[in-house]
């Protein structure tokens, strides 16, 4: 088999065979295919697309390119949730303990920040002492004992994706639906869960900017999950505005803890309760409606907060920070961003908000960059809120005050203000179930 022929076939709109796709991914993994040929095929896929069958083959080849976890020693149903990436998206910190408080197992592998989006592992590392690496034995023991453990992807998971992603990043081929689906699901399927709830973000802060594209990506990923024998459902959720008010690692942990205490922002709480409801329902705990009620109950009676504390303690984190969020060290400097106009915030460029947080030191521009865990943004006004000229729309936090100017500029130019109040947008647009699923979607029909 020759890589040249595979590139030519896809360039001319042909359908690649399973063997051709395996040959490609094996060659990417062992380094025998040069970067220029890998990039050329990515570009051909970008323009010509892939069938569902080809995308499944690509996903399974990516999954099989490295280690796979074996969760057979975990007692009970294992459910995971995966977000396609957003700004202020700290849902895992709330949803996982809620679900685990009902005896459903959450053996979670999370990522670090990518581009303008934050990563759950970076957020957890804002908790002093929290270990995001555990041996397989300790990971499984913790899931069996507490119901929830969370680690980073430190092992050799889907190494083909690591190489492909790095090349896509520099060859303008990231936003290709089959390539995104294979990248996300290849990694997800390397873990050994029974059920997967996908949170496909849509809007200015997500990789998919339109609801239609997000639905198509969700459908593809749900089909891949089904073909891999997993119960899979996707929710299309709003990322035209940051989720909650906090952006940045420690700030987001604090907001998640406030939510576990029942004092979270409305939008963030609603998305968390919906995701947890679907996870519990897939795990057989009742209808979605019943399960959303269960999730709300776990917040009201403190059991989800207790589960989060147990997890933090088990992974070496300082529980005093969770018991009282005032124990988090405040960043040295803060800066108020004031509106230059009066009116209503009608739209924000959420990606730019994420980049502003990055500019404050909350993320990395290069792999070697050190994160300032205290850095970030607390929004004072969000889309739909009224504001007067001179009023604060956000507070910036950082340990290096030279970073404020660039972040403020980004934030102001990303905030559109107009005279009239904008129309409300849904937080959850719709659900994409798998065809055989008996899950009730009455709350959010497709
Ligand atoms: N997240 C991933 O892991 N891969 C993509 O291609 C896009 C988002």
Image (cartoon, rainbow, N blue to C red):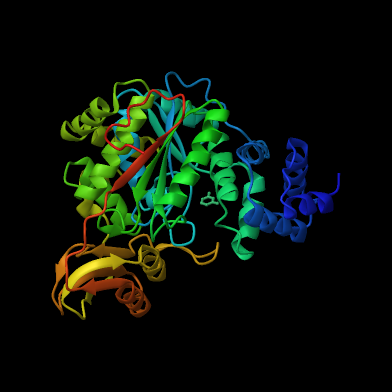
In this view, the residue farthest toward the front is: 13
Q: Is residue 287 above or below residue 35?
A: above
| Residue 384 makes an appearance in the image | yes
Quadrant housing the C terminus? top left
272 or 237: nearer the eye? 237
Query: Which residue is pictured at 75% across the width and 46% down the height?
Result: 24
Spot occupied by residue 324 in the image (x, y as percentages of width and height): 20, 47
Q: In the figure, is residue 160 to the left or right of 446?
A: right
Quadrant housing the N terminus? top right
Q: Is residue 260 above or below residue 330?
A: above
Query: Which residue is pictured at 61% across the width and 54% down the height?
Result: 165
Spot occupied by residue 93 in the image (x, y as percentages of width and height): 33, 43
9 or 226: nearer the eye? 9
Spot occupied by residue 417 in the image (x, y as percentages of width and height): 23, 73
Query: Which residue is pictured at 55% across the width and 40% down the height?
Result: 185
216 or 157: nearer the eye? 216
Q: In the figure, is residue 306 to the left or right of 83?
A: left
Q: In the figure, is residue 190 to the left or right of 387?
A: right
| Residue 110 makes an appearance in the image | no
Q: Is residue 348 above or below residue 406?
A: above
């Amino acid at each position: 088999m020759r890589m040249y022929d595979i590139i030519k076939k896809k360039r001319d709109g042909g359908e690649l065979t399973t063997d051709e796709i395996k040959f490609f991914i094996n060659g990417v993994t062992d380094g025998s295919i040069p970067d220029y040929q890998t990039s050329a095929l990515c570009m051909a896929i970008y323009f010509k697309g892939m069938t569902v069958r080809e995308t499944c083959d690509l996903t399974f080849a990516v999954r099989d390119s490295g280690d796979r976890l074996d969760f057979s020693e975990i007692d009970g149903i294992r459910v995971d949730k995966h977000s396609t990436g957003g700004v202020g998206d700290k849902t895992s910190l709330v949803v996982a303990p809620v679900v685990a408080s009902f005896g459903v197992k959450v053996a979670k592998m999370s990522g670090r920040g990518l581009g303008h989006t934050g990563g759950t592992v970076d957020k957890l590392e804002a908790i002093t002492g929290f270990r995001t690496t555990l041996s397989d034995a300790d990971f499984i023991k913790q899931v069996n004992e507490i119901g929830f453990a969370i680690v980073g992807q430190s092992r050799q998971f889907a190494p083909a994706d690591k190489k492909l992603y790095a090349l896509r990043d520099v060859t303008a081929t990231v936003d290709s639906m089959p390539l995104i689906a294979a990248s996300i699901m290849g990694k997800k399927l390397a873990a050994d869960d029974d059920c997967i709830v996908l949170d496909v973000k849509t809007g200015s802060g997500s990789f998919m900017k339109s609801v239609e594209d997000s639905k198509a990506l969700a459908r593809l990923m749900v089909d891949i999950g089904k073909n891999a024998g997993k119960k899979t459902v996707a929710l299309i959720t709003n990322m035209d505005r940051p989720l909650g008010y906090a952006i940045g690692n420690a700030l987001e942990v604090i907001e998640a803890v406030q939510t576990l205490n029942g004092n979270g922002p409305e939008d963030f709480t609603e998305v968390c309760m919906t995701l947890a409801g679907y996870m519990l329902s897939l795990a057989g705990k009742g209808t979605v409606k019943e399960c959303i009620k269960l999730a709300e109950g776990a917040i009201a009676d403190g059991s989800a907060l207790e589960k989060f504390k147990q997890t933090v303690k088990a992974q070496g984190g300082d529980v005093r920070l969770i018991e009282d969020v005032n124990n988090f060290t405040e960043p040295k400097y803060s800066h108020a961003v004031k509106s230059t106009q009066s009116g209503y915030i009608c739209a924000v460029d959420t990606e730019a908000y994420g980049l502003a947080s990055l500019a404050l030191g909350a993320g990395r521009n290069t792999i070697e960059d050190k994160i300032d865990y205290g850095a970030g943004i607390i929004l004072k006004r969000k889309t739909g809120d009224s504001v007067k000229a001179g009023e604060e729309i956000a507070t910036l936090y950082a340990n290096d005050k030279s970073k404020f100017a660039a972040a403020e500029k980004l934030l102001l130019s990303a905030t559109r203000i107009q005279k009239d109040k904008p129309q409300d947008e849904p937080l959850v647009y719709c659900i994409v179930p798998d065809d055989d699923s008996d899950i009730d979607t009455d709350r959010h029909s497709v």
